[in-house]
């Protein structure tokens, strides 16, 4: 196998594609966590997004409805989490776990009749440019619109958090809900919005998998990506731009692992498949060692229940 | 306090109602479906023994998890600890595949417990010495353990006479859990679970370690102030938890399975989290909860056979139980509010 320049271009393009679900889910979860809410249901919301996107595509044959529907389904399922944690003051960790278990079960139940149905081809943009420009073509062009959105999202998120008033409110709610509440901010409403936004992004992330990345429905097809997205948020120390970098590293490991398998690298397949998970652990260890750095960026009230006395 | 142990029942009733609604939406007669789900599976002796068979690993793992959860350590990778325990225990059993002897089974069980313990020590050590989030580490290790198992049963440990099926040799009879009754699959592993319950009741409620665990769970600051060795305690609760999960894994492979293959656990390690909560982290509560949750597994299988309802309804039920349980805890908060209101009124 020759490692010529155009092959590297294609490789980078495929790394970008495989990092999209991680970017989307992690960016959504980042906003949720910045408001002080720890939602461990990412995997559950993603898988619900994946099946509803795919099912809507098969039923309506309209990709726009499928994409919007997947985001809506993410919103609806995250509403359960929001209601429990914000209105009924339940423990964030336990509720998030319940959401993941429930989501995986529900998706498999709903998806029973969609197993084995071939997906529809998702339109890609600038496909002619992809072929005509060497190296940069496969990197910059010939992707779905969702990919372009995903790569813009961390920058938009960064702008939102740092430069807008709403972003300031979200950060205030996450860092000190009591002071925010005293300033007249409705902490519960802000947190609800952030949870639902996270749900929408996770839904979209799932739909990217079932409609674009591997266009079909397979049970449990998110395969732990939701958990890796959660780890990415910690990896990025809650900074959107670092989420993008982290997602590309993980996408890179996934693709590298596939290529190493393809060229018959003399390491058992399973060890290569374990790489992303092991890498997550190593990265977590490396960044968590400096506890000051973690503390500086962690939303202070993350995972704590806020209750306003009336 | 009474309400604290009563709300799980409310959660179960609400889950059954919710399940009825789901069955109705799916186009089944809800009463009939619920009957197939919750009554048919245990209406005969065989069914009842199957219930105990499935409750055994759930109970064991949940007992272990209760140590972690009580002390605010979120070990959610019990599935990985179960798998690794089964790998180590299974490895020992395979060493003795053509031998018999009374000493083999205890060795296999011990190896399983140690395997689970070692695997649980990874997130514990990383948490105590590197400040790493134990939720993510323990969970990532679940995937790693399943890939290790996959590698072993396909590769070096696969049965040489097995026509390349992804499975190991059958264990010898000396590596198998003794069956309790002729014709039923229920095995001696249930005594391990019951022993864990008794021992845990004693440890959690009657010893200094139990007291430390309880205080650390209620307030880390108090625990520090009291001079408890926090790091040691984290390591200990993870080791207990891992050992229990490892025992559950070894119970499965030496009990109903009898060899290693890819599917040694239908996510018992994850479901046990629900069992631990439903049992209120109380050893005796966990016995009850493990029976209830085991019934969702059995019911899902029965409903699939008789009504062609997909078996994943089991997970939907399990998720719902936890949702409703957490939600019904609001009643507890609410009660506290009423009481404190009354106090305030008295003062004014």
Image: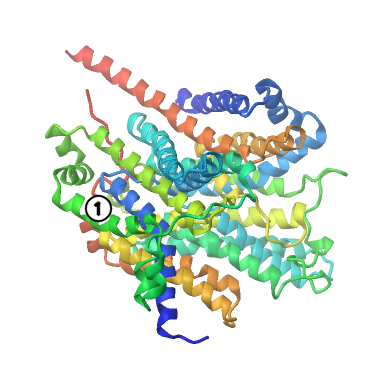
Please provide percent x and percent y for residue A176.
Answer: 19, 43
Residue at the far left in the pictured view? A183
Please tell me which residue lies in front, A275 or A177: A275
Residue A15, located in which quarter of the rendered image? bottom left
Name the quarter where the N terminus of chain B is drawn.
Answer: top left
Q: Is residue A55 above or below residue B154?
A: above
User: Horizontally, is B131 left or right of A58 in the view?
Assistant: left
What scheme was used to colour the molecule?
Answer: rainbow
The number of numbered badges drawn on the structure is 1
What residue is at 18 percent from the left and 37 percent from the top? A178
Q: Residues within 10 Å of mark 1 (few under 14, many from 20)?
A: some
- x, y percentage for residue B104? 76, 65
- Quarter of the image for residue A149 reads bottom left
Q: Residue at x 27, y 50 (%)?
A: B225
Residue B185 seen in the figure: yes
Q: Quadrant of the C terminus of chain B?
A: top left
**Place of residue A157 in the rendered image (x, y in percent of width and height, measured from the top left):** 25, 53
Is A45 or B328 nearer to us in this picture? A45
Which structural element holds mark 1?
helix
The answer, for residue B201, to whether it is visible in the render is no
Which residue is labeled 1 in the image?
A: A157
Query: From the viewer's perspective, is A60 left or right of B98?
Result: left
A202 relative to A183, above or below: below
**Where residue B346 sits in the image (x, y, percent)?**
22, 12
* Relative side of B316 to A298, left or right: right
Q: Residue at x 39, y 34 (%)?
A: A79
In front of the other: B94 or A208: A208
Of residues B134 and A77, the one nearer the viewer is: A77
Q: Label 1: chain?
A: A
């Amino acid at each position: 196998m020759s490692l010529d320049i155009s092959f590297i271009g294609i490789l980078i393009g495929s790394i970008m594609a495989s990092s999209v679900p991680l970017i989307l889910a992690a960016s959504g979860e980042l906003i949720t966590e910045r408001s002080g809410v720890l939602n461990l249901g990412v995997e559950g919301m993603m898988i619900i997004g994946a099946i509803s996107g795919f099912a809507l595509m098969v039923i309506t044959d309209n990709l726009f409805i499928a994409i919007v529907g997947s985001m809506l389904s993410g919103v609806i399922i995250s509403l359960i989490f929001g209601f429990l944690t914000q209105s009924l003051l339940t423990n964030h960790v336990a509720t998030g776990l319940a959401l993941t278990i429930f989501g995986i079960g529900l998706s498999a139940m709903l998806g029973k009749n969609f197993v084995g149905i071939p997906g529809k081809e998702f339109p890609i943009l600038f496909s002619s440019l992809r072929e005509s420009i060497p190296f940069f073509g496969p990197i910059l062009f010939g992707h779905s619109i969702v990919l372009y959105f995903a790569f813009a999202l961390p920058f938009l998120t960064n702008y939102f958090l740092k430069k807008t008033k709403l972003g300031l409110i979200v950060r205030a709610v996450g860092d000190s809900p009591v002071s925010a509440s005293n300033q007249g901010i409705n902490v519960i409403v802000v947190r609800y919005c952030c949870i639902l936004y996270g749900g929408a992004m996770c839904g979209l992330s799932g739909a990217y998998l079932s409609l674009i990345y591997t266009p079909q429905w397979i049970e449990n097809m998110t395969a732990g990506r939701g958990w890796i997205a959660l780890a990415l948020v910690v990896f990025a120390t809650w900074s959107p731009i670092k989420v993008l970098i982290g997602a590309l590293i993980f996408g890179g490991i996934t693709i590298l692992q596939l290529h190493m398998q393809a060229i018959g690298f003399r390491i058992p397949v399973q060890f290569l498949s374990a790489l992303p998970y092991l890498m997550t652990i190593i990265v977590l260890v490396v960044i968590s060692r400096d506890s000051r750095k973690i503390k500086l960026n962690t939303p202070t009230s993350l995972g704590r229940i806020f209750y306003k006395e009336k | 306090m009474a309400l604290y142990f009563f709300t799980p029942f409310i959660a179960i009733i609400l889950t059954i109602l919710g399940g009825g609604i789901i069955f109705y939406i799916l186009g089944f007669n809800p009463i009939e479906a619920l009957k197939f789900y919750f009554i048919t599976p245990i209406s005969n002796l065989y069914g009842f023994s199957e219930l105990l068979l499935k409750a055994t690993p759930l109970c064991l793992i949940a007992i272990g998890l209760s140590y972690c959860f009580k002390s605010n350590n979120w070990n959610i990778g019990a599935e990985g600890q179960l798998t690794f325990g089964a790998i180590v225990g299974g490895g020992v059993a395979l060493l003795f595949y053509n031998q018999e002897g009374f000493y083999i089974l205890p060795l296999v069980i011990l190896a399983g417990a140690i395997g689970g313990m070692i695997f649980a020590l990874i997130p514990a050590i990383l948490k105590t010495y590197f400040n790493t989030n134990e939720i993510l580490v323990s969970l990532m290790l679940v995937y790693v353990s399943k890939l290790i198992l996959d590698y072993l049963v396909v590769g070096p440990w696969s049965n040489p006479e097995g026509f390349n099926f992804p499975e190991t040799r059958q264990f010898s009879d000396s590596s198998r859990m003794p069956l309790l009754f002729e014709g039923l699959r229920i095995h001696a592993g249930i005594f391990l679970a019951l022993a864990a319950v008794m021992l845990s009741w004693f440890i959690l409620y009657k010893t200094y370690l139990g007291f430390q665990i309880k205080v650390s769970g209620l307030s880390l600051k108090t625990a520090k102030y009291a001079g408890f060795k926090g790091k040691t305690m984290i390591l200990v609760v993870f080791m207990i938890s891992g050992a229990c999960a490892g025992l559950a894994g070894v119970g499965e492979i030496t009990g109903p399975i009898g060899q290693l293959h890819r599917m040694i656990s239908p996510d018992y390690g994850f479901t046990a989290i629900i069992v631990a909560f439903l049992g209120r982290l109380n050893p005796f509560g966990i016995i009850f909860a493990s029976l209830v949750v085991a019934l969702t597994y059995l019911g899902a299988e029965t409903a699939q056979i008789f009504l062609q309802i997909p078996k994943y309804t089991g997970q939907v039920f399990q998720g719902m139980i936890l949702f409703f349980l957490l939600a019904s805890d609001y009643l507890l908060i609410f009660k506290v509010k009423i009481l404190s209101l009354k106090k305030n009124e008295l003062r004014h």
